């Protein structure tokens, strides 16, 4: 099978590509495949002829999207439209987000729950979802949450501040599922040869807050010289609105594919920040 992975420069695409053995895989970066340019997409469609597209390319910086809505929709929505239109016979796996929800629930969101994104980022991803559902003959939309990549993520930034011994303010009332990209990549492997079509939530097990993630890191590393201050999301100077509660239920994925991602507390220990003295 020929598999095209978009966003080849990104951490998730690299993780997925490294696991796909026995397939003909292409994972071009932005310089090789610009999804916002129809000619670039058409070239890959005609020359590579992918049977499956795993679409991970996106602008995921929520604040950047809020400040640059045209660019956000160009990449996240129009780029997706280009891929679907130029590859009408390809199966499609699309990486989406918990930010398609408004956070008004107090229990994990299911695939069938009403969407109502608060941010430009969430709206651009939902628009892409809607187009895929209306035009793609065979697709899987993966909604995931709070991706960690062992590079420029929340834990990396917090760990840097902790090493400086600073007092750190961290949001303690925004809830979600920390998801390790290496676990999500493993889960995607279960979808490559399947016949399922529809939306599925995939996250690591466990719901928590940003504050509790930082506290867990400090406790595991036995760090004493830093103070964490629990603050409200309402007091944090975000440029983009975020759902206060966006935990996702992965029960459908577990039921259909008989596969369960590990608890976030177990898996996050593989993060490079836990292995730095």
Image (cartoon, grey):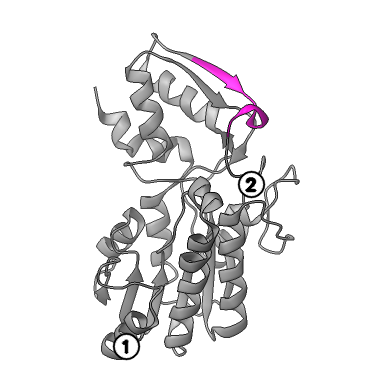
Q: Earlier in the sequence, mark 2 or mark 1?
A: 1
**Residue 109: x %, y % from top left:** 68, 53
Task: Give me the C-alpha separation between circle 2 and circle 1.
Answer: 37 Å
How many discs mark residues in the rendered view?
2
Q: Nearer the viewer, residue 19 or 139?
A: 139
Residue 229 falls in image quadrant? top right
Residue 246: which disc? 2
87 shown above or below 97 = below
Residue 1's tag is none
| Circle 1 residue | 49
Rendered location of residue 133, percent (x, y): 60, 78
Name which residue lies at 37% across and 19% down.
Answer: 162
Screen quadrant of the C terminus = top left
Q: Residue most toward the top?
A: 225
Quarter of the N terminus within the rendering: bottom left
Residue 136 lies, in percent from the top left, at 54, 83
Which residue does the image show at 46% across and 49% down from the upper left? 61
Q: Where does the magenta region start and end?
A: 228-237
- Left or right of 181? Residue 28 is left
- Tag 1 secondary structure: loop
Q: Say which element carries label 2.
A: loop
Report the residue at 66% width, 44% height from top. Answer: 243
Relative horizontal placement of residue 13, taking residue 79 as reference (left or right): left
């Amino acid at each position: 099978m020929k598999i095209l992975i978009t966003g080849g420069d990104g951490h998730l695409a690299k993780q997925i590509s490294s696991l796909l053995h026995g397939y003909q895989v292409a994972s071009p970066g932005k310089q090789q495949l610009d999804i916002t340019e129809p000619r670039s997409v058409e070239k890959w469609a005609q020359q590579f002829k992918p049977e499956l597209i795993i679409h991970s390319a996106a602008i995921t910086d929520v604040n950047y999207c809020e400040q640059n809505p045209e660019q956000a929709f160009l990449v996240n929505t129009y780029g997706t439209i280009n891929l679907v239109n130029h590859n009408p016979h390809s199966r499609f796996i699309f990486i989406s987000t918990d930010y398609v929800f408004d956070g008004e629930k107090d229990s994990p969101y299911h695939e069938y729950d009403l969407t109502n994104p608060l941010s430009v980022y969430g709206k651009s991803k939902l628009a892409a979802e809607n187009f895929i559902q209306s035009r793609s003959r065979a697709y899987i939309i993966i909604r995931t949450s709070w991706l960690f990549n062992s590079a420029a993520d929340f834990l990396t930034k917090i760990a840097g501040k902790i090493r400086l011994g600073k007092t750190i303010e961290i949001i303690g009332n925004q809830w979600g599922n920390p998801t390790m990209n290496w676990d999500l990549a493993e889960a995607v492997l279960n979808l490559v040869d399947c016949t399922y079509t529809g939306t599925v939530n995939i996250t690591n097990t466990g719901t928590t807050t940003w504050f509790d993630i930082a506290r867990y890191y400090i406790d595991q590393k036995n760090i004493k010289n830093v103070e964490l201050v629990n603050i409200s999301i309402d007091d944090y100077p975000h440029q983009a609105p975020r759902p206060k509660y966006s935990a996702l239920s992965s029960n459908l994925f577990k039921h259909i594919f008989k596969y369960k991602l590990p608890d976030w507390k177990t898996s996050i220990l593989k993060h490079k920040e836990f292995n730095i003295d």
